[in-house]
Image: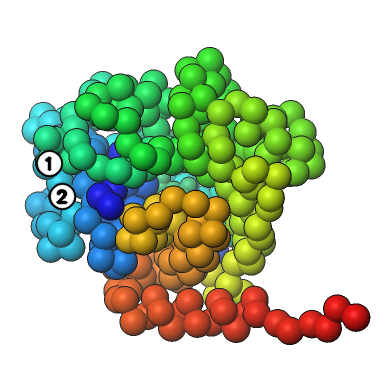
Amino acid sequence: MKLLVVGSVAFDAIETPFGKTDKILGGAATYIGITSSILGVKSGIVSVVGGDFPQEHLDMFTDREVNIEGIEIVKEGKTFFWSGKYHNDLNTRDTLATEVNVLENFDPKIPDSMQDAEILLLGNLHPGVQLSVLEKMNNRPKLVILDTMNFWMDCAWDILMDMIAKTDVITINDEEARQLSGEYSLVKAAKKIHAMGPEYVIIKKGEHGALLFHDGKVFAIPALPLEDVFDPTGAGDTFAGGFAAYLAKKGKIDFDTMKSALIVGSAMASFTVEKFGTQRIEEVNESDMFSRLRQFKELTTFDIELQ
Ligand code: AMP
């Protein structure tokens, strides 16, 4: 299956307890595109950058066979810029700057070559932009996956609700699930979110893994315990990218395939956090992925006598 990704392609400046970076390559769609290419899945990105965006980054996508016909370049504009600083626990961060720049008037255009995508992954963007992408598809994709965040709950609630109603799979973190549903219990939160539209609800719990809810069932996975977490930026996007790309690779959309997809997402995210920005995930190949999946299997498999 083909995967269409809509999201930011950006510059990030990141500060963690271990150091800081100047402007480096970032953006949700960037992490998702790189991750899909590691799985060998045909993906295409719809996004916008400014004239300041280096050709070498665009070439990186092309070298990975990520279709970038849908990345518009606004020559006189500046690329979206985000800057964040992580606290010592690395679970919380402060946003230091968000310069929306060319994303402000982003009018996504879907290239003909991606109109037949069966899976659509809507990365974290204004829900109005996410909705417009869905409306511009000639046929509704088989699966619509939505990533969103608390910011849009605060400032674009109604349109976010319209978007969620048209979503098959939503991925959000635990705090966002609580804010969206008004429920503290994640089980109750998932029930309320199902009622808003999505058949599948994925709640991410950072270093504690993720939960998948569907049709009265729940599946839980841990995150791989890592000795050193260097920079969590992009972990959520890499997770969503691994999840969506695995479904695209298998060509199957059901609860059991999604369980494995969740593991792949979590394994891929465990690479991203090991170095700044996209540095680590850009080094990863298919065999690295398989060895980490083996580690996951060892971490989660056990025998137990039930009598
Ligand atoms: P994550 O760490 O998974 O939340 O994603 C971090 C990435 O999201 C960074 O590379 C940023 O460039 C990008 N990002 C941050 N804020 C926004 C926003 N408001 N809209 C789109 N992308 C964003």
| Residue 74 coordinates in the image, percent (x, y) | 13, 31
| Residue 118 coordinates in the image, percent (x, y) | 30, 43
Picture quadrant where residue 243 is located: bottom left
Image vertical order of residue 303 relative to residue 57, above or below: below
- The front one of 53 and 159 is 159
- The front one of 29 and 229 is 29
What residue is disc 2 on?
67
Q: Residue at x 15, y 59 (%)?
A: 65
| Residue 235 coordinates in the image, percent (x, y) | 47, 57
Q: Residue at x 39, y 33 (%)?
A: 125
Tell me the crowding category of disc 1: few under 14, some 14 to 19, or many 20 or more residues within 10 angstroms, Cα based: few
- The front one of 27 and 222 is 222
Q: Is residue 111 left or right of residue 286?
A: left
Name, please, the residue furthest toward the front: 307
Residue type, label 1: Ser
Q: Residue at x 55, y 53 (%)?
A: 255
Q: Quadrant of ligand 1?
A: top left
- The front one of 192 and 180 is 192
